[in-house]
Image (tube, grey):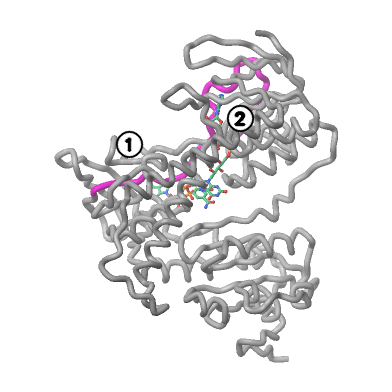
Amino acid sequence: MSDKFDVIVIGAGPGGYVAAIRAAQLGLKTACVEKWVDDKGGAVLGGTCLNVGCIPSKALLESTHQFHNAQHADVHGIQVSGDVTMDVKAMVARKDKIVGNLTMGVAGLFKANGVTLLQGAGKLHGGKKVEVTAADGTSNTYDAENVILASGSIPVEIPPAPLTEGLILDNEGALNINETPKRLGVIGAGVIGLEMGSVWARLGTEVTVLEAMDDFLPAADKDVAKEAAKIFKKQKLDIKVGARCTGTEIIDGKEVKVKYTDAKGDQEIVVDKLIVAVGRKPQTQGLLADDSGVSLDERGFIFVNEQCQTGVPGVYAIGDSVRGPMLAHKASEEGIMVADIVAGHHAQINYDVIPSIIYTHPELAWVGKTEQELKAEGVKIKVGKFPFAANGRAMAANDTDGFVKLIACEETDRVLGVHIVGGIASELIGQAAIAMEFCSSAEDLQMTVFAHPTVSEAIHEAALAADGHAIHMANRKKR
Ligand code: FAD
Ligand code: NAD
């Protein structure tokens, strides 16, 4: 088959499938290439995010959070007769059902928008030719006016902890543990380590997290990292910082001895399962033919400019395979931007306002710069902080851990960063992102009417606190 497309997207993750749908909506003849197949040979759409990332992890986090709440329902006066128990297999099956529905939904959206799905591994050749090789080895080559590379990322593996079926797992294996381990080890106290560690700690597993760096959550504002460390300790997540894994040993085919070094010297723990969550790397193997003209940067990411253009006119790259945070919403927005540019529209992304969230409980969420970054840049700032313990709705929900911290410029009053630890921080951070996208000042937020009683009022109060005017907290600024 020989055919020419206006746009060929390689990869159907949240970057690629969104780019393909947008391009088709803009009237461009669009194809999307995906190599991932299921047991029956059908294309698996939605990439890491829908299949082994954002959605399945959040399904497990939600189930175990509900379990925790059911166990503590007595605070509301609810009496549960007998023990609250978790059927882990049913929890995993529910997660799989949600994933199935969503990936089928992407196939439906492709059909509805007229996106052609090309099943197989895509390789970019010079002259914007895309070779697609199906699982049975047959291949076809297609011409494209524009190519969008959206090949995503894969987990980093480390030599001291080689993946071992059922015992040493990457993030995909971690999502399919189907009985509660007594002891779980996690290498890496990053986003996956904290989210998956929380899932199992809530079900009673003893969780030990080994983090090589001396700092906990170095990308977060220090107040957020400090508060989070305090709360995770209460939740019995044993996070050991400055602990570098040096080796593993499988004992009798059923346990894992994990060796590590820390400030005190050589140490070891024995666990029933070990999750390796030490970061992800761009997936570019087999993607670029020698004559493609596209270059990688020194860390193996596809080299692009702010508008996701590679060095080859008409070839773009987006999502986890390019610089910037490895986040689904960043990948999707880049997909939309590139489709708009290809269709001849002006488009850009404000990379300064991309929210980050860790979906533990409480959740950790932030957008913009941290207090430490702003001080290092010499920006004069004012900080307003408001605890959920003083918010009526949070009290009603029995969810009072954490705070909203708002940072504004002392000279211009512009909001420069918002950092939240709180039960529904993931929902609140969107309000902060909208405010920052609209270049809001702290005063704009102070003058906005927030409904009562809502958890969002903590954002209002934090904005007021930046000028010493929070109502429900003693914070008068000395003048
Ligand atoms: P991917 O989703 O990786 O998709 C790339 C696709 O391209 C894949 O389907 C792959 O098979 C295909 N592909 C690759 N090479 C080829 C080729 N040569 N030919 C054809 N197809 C190819 N982010 C968030 O924002 N929020 C979260 O809560 C969140 N939770 C996560 C939880 C976990 C456990 C993990 C692992 C990640 C999580 N992420 C989260 C990150 C998020 O999943 C990624 O940032 C996002 O999926 C990146 O999208 P992408 O389209 O760039 O790549
Ligand atoms: P990460 O970069 O968040 O954390 C990896 C951690 O492992 C770091 O703290 C690092 O210092 C540590 N580490 C590295 N090597 C180590 C070693 N040898 N021993 C001990 N610790 C070591 O990576 P991740 O948790 O694997 O997640 C991968 C990506 O997926 C992230 O970049 C994130 O953006 C994305 N993700 C996002 C979400 C979300 O948005 N909620 C959830 C999960 C994953």
Image point 73% across, 91% down: which residue?
479
Residue 276: say if magenta.
yes
Image point 69% across, 41% down: which residue?
334
Q: Amino acid at mark 2?
A: Leu
Specify which label sits upstream in the sequence, 1 or 2.
1
Residue ID for mark 1? 163
Question: Residue 53, how many percent across, how many down?
Answer: 49, 44
Image point 67% across, 84% down: which residue?
470
Indicate which label's residue lies in the foreground, 1 or 2.
Answer: 1
Count residues near mark 1 (Cα–Cα under 10 Å), then give few for <14, some for 14-19, many for 20+. Answer: some
Left or right of residue 222, residue 347 in this image: right
Helix, strand or loop at mark 2 = loop
User: Which residue extends farthest left?
Assistant: 252
Q: Quadrant of the N terminus?
A: top right
Q: Quick check: 228 above or below 7?
A: below
Helix, strand or loop at mark 1 = loop
Question: Would you say the magenta stretch is mainly helix, strand or loop?
Answer: loop
Real-space Cα distance between discs 1 and 2? Answer: 27 Å
Residue 67: say if magenta.
no
Residue ID for mark 2? 296
Q: Which of the 4 image quadrants contains residue 166?
A: top left
- Check contact, mark 1 vs mark 2: CB within 8 A: no
Left or right of residue 123, residue 333 in this image: right
Ligand 1 falls in quadrant: top right
Q: Which residues are magenta?
A: 272-299
Q: Amino acid at mark 1?
A: Leu
Q: Which of the 4 image quadrants contains residue 403?
A: bottom right
